[in-house]
Image: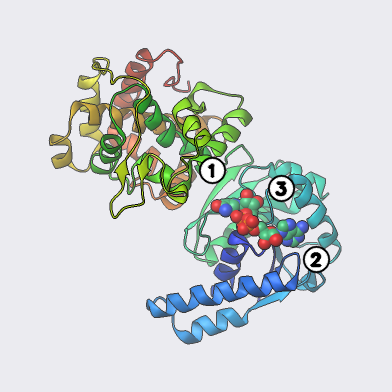
Amino acid sequence: MSTVGILGAGAMGAGIAQTAACAGWRVHLVDLDLDTCEASKQGIITRLARNVEKGRMSQTQADAAAERIAPSTTRDLHGCELFIEAIVEDLNIKVAAVTPVLDVLPEDAIIATNTSSLSVSEFGERIEAAPRTCGMHFFNPAAIMKLVEVVSGNRTEQRIVDRVADVATQWGKKVARCADTPGFIVNRVARPYYLEAFRCLEDGIAGPPTIDSAMKLIGGFRMGPFELTDFIGHDVNAATTRSVWKQWECPARLAPVAAQEAMVAEGNLGRKSGCGVYDWSGPQPVCVYRPTQDAATSVGGLDATALRFCEAATQNAEALADSTEQQRIVFTRILAALLNEAAWAAHQGVADPADIDVAMRAGVNYPRGLFAWADDIGGDLVSETLARLNESVDDNRFAAPS
Ligand code: NAI
């Protein structure tokens, strides 16, 4: 039986432990003390019991998975083929915590970090194990979300990346391979879904319910941008934007939007604070966003292009027939911005188009991969739409990579 050591028994470490144990791996779960590991294991047992109730697994399978998880200390990690760190998001703390573990692990053990925003290469260099260190970026909740971004550091050996990709697949995950770049794939390519929605709001094109419904009805997205950011938390969402934007040297495409920053400053963080763009305290969400300026009456004469783009992009002709001009402009702006971001990511060597498509489908449940979607729409129409949109803005953010 293969063995994995997991450092950090918090939200992510517990989810990863559950995933590995359910796939037949023995798990050593380590945290600051054994009580924390025991409590984390109890949480896993509760979630396994819920899976049994829902018929997703048998009681025998749940018992066997729980049996394979051992609350441990770092001294127990000598038999681990793979070690995953999932502790606080601070490079100095990660380096200080992982360095002594290397003395216990087998010399050829694979070292993986679940970091969302730190450099995998720098982490590998700082612990002096760069060739066998890679990123294994799970999504929250890790036991449920299907995607793992397998991140190659600058000096990670190919066989390490291949083995980690195999392990993630055996654990039932979809793998997207990517380079060690800010935001990796999902946290970078998804940014326009939120940012362009807020810009549509700031431009006064439409209110949140109209924008959310455009993306769901015309685009087939499961949640609209504001429902989703209210769910994620605007503080978390805006912090990710800021981090990715700065690390990519502040392109206009990824720039934070004042409307969202103001919500964070006012404490309107979304569901967790009771109120964000919507008030979630009643049986139905009620939109409480108040525009900072009067609604613009003009949408920039874009409707002819937008209509053709929407016709080519939608799988719901009925919804498109019922849509308003505002909804078509909103959908066109947001989807075109997403397609453009995916193109920039591939252009900048973040990942291959096929991996970007896997990541966006499995990581954020997009109805289609963005490159597959662009192919369906047609490259010429996508280019023409981006060019028309770029003429309508003053920050060049719809400029496509050459
Ligand atoms: P968390 O706060 O739920 O858990 C962190 C755990 O690490 C805690 O149990 C803490 O006691 C333990 N810990 C801290 N310092 C330690 C040390 N020196 N030695 C041993 N254990 C230590 O955090 P969460 O959300 O599980 O995040 C962990 C990592 O996963 C971070 O790097 C985060 O950026 C990343 N991540 C988080 C996601 C999320 O949505 N929460 C998604 C993907 C990655």
Residue assigned mark 3: 156
Residue type (three-letter) at the residue carrying disc 3: Thr
Gap in angstroms between the C-alphas marked 3 and 2? 18 Å
Residue 105 tag number:
2
Residue assigned mark 1: 236
Q: Could you tell me residue 269's position as x and y percent?
A: 47, 42
Q: Which dot, 3 or 2, sits closer to the camera?
A: 2
Callout 1 touching callout 3 (CB < 8 Å): no
Q: Could you tell me residue 337's position as x and y percent?
A: 40, 29
Residue at 54% x, 66% y: name it: 171
Residue at 13% x, 35% y: name it: 321
Question: Where is residue 7, by image quadrant?
Answer: bottom right
**Residue 20 in the figure: left or right of residue 202:** right
Nearest to N terminus: mark 1 or mark 3: 3
Give the residue at the far bottom of this rendering.
60
Nearest to N terminus: mark 3 or mark 2: 2
